Each structure stands twice: as C-alpha cells, then as structure tokens.
Image (cartoon, rainbow, N blue to C red):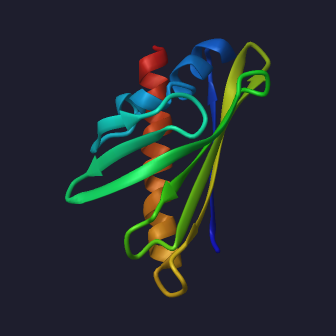
C-alpha cells in the first residue's frame, strides 16, 4: 500500500490552519473539484458525500483530536479502483507559524496503487496551496 505524504509550512497561527482543516463538512473550500453534496451525522462517525467529477464517494470522519490538531477520514465502501483509502491531517506549531502534515494510504489491490497515489499527491499539494491562500 503506497503512502502519500505532503508537509507544508505556513506563516500563520496553528489555530487558524486548524480551524480550516478541522471543518470536515467544508473541505471543499480548499480541495478544488470537490463538492460536498451532503453530510450525514455530526462529529466522529459522520459521513460526507463527495462528488469529484463523475465520481461520488462517501468519506467518514474516523478521528478528530483538537488537542493534537489531528483529523483522520477514510473512504466508506470505496468505488473501484480503491479497496481502501485513509488520510490524516495534522497541524503542528513551528516557530512563528505552523506546518501541515498530510499523510494518506491507498490500496487498489495492485497495479493501480502508484498512479492513484500520484494523483492523490497532486490533490494534497493543491489542497495545501489553497489552504495557504485562504490563510492569506
């Protein structure tokens, strides 16, 4: 299973970045091409129904730890080519700013792992760039 990892520094207070990252229901603010069609439930265990182009997926909030500034979500009943996908975003105080560590694992059962992981890497990089723009 490939691991996707992006670490990005921001010149912003960790609390400001955490406010964006922790808002599971509004990740479409920083993930281009993603539309959250509906939310089911609240807090850990809630599901967001996400459309990205023609693909409709359900992501579940698996963990939310405000003290550690960490959020984990995973695909529920993932569509092909996914067998599983899980991602954790952690905001770390660093000097006068902060750092976002965004780490995910993807399993497609084999030959699609690397292309899917490469695509997800671009999603993470684009998301981190958009978060920077939102932070000003």
Q: Quick one: 46 or 116, which is closer to the camera?
A: 46
Residue name at image x 46 percent, y 34 percent: 129
- Where residue 8 sits, quadrant-wise, is top right
Q: Quadrant of the C terminus?
A: top left
The image position of residue 25, as x and y in percent, is: 43, 29
Considering only vertical position in the picture, is 98 above or below 15? below
* Residue 92 visible in rendering: yes
Left or right of 28, for residue 70: right
Whether residue 45 sits left or right of residue 59 in the image: it is: right
- Could you say where residue 44 lies in the image, as x and y percent from the top left? 61, 35
Q: Residue at x 46, y 33 (%)?
A: 41
The image shows residue 10 at horizontal and vertical percentages of 61, 24
Q: Residue at x 45, y 70 (%)?
A: 116
Q: Residue at x 38, y 69 (%)?
A: 79
Q: Can residue 13 be seen? A: no
For the N terminus, which image quadrant?
bottom right
Q: How many marks?
A: 0
The answer to whether residue 55 is above or below residue 37 is: below
- Outermost residue toward the front in this view: 41
State the residue in front, 39 or 107. 39
Q: Nearer the viewer, residue 117 or 72?
A: 72
Q: Reply above or below: 20 against 120.
A: above
Give left or right: position of 99 versus 118.
right
């Amino acid at each position: 299973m490939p691991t996707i990892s992006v670490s990005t520094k921001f010149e912003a207070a960790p609390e400001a970045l955490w406010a964006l990252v922790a808002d599971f229901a509004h990740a479409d603010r920083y993930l281009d091409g993603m539309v959250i069609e509906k939310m089911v439930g609240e807090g850990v265990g809630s599901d967001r129904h996400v459309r990205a182009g023609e693909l409709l997926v359900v992501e579940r909030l698996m963990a939310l730890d405000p003290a550690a500034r960490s959020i984990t979500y995973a695909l529920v009943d993932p569509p092909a080519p996914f067998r599983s996908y899980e991602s954790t975003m952690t905001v770390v105080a660093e000097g006068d700013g902060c750092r976002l560590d965004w780490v995910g694992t993807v399993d497609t059962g084999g030959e699609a792992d690397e292309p899917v992981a490469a695509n997800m890497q671009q999603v993470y990089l684009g998301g981190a760039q958009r978060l920077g723009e939102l932070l000003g």
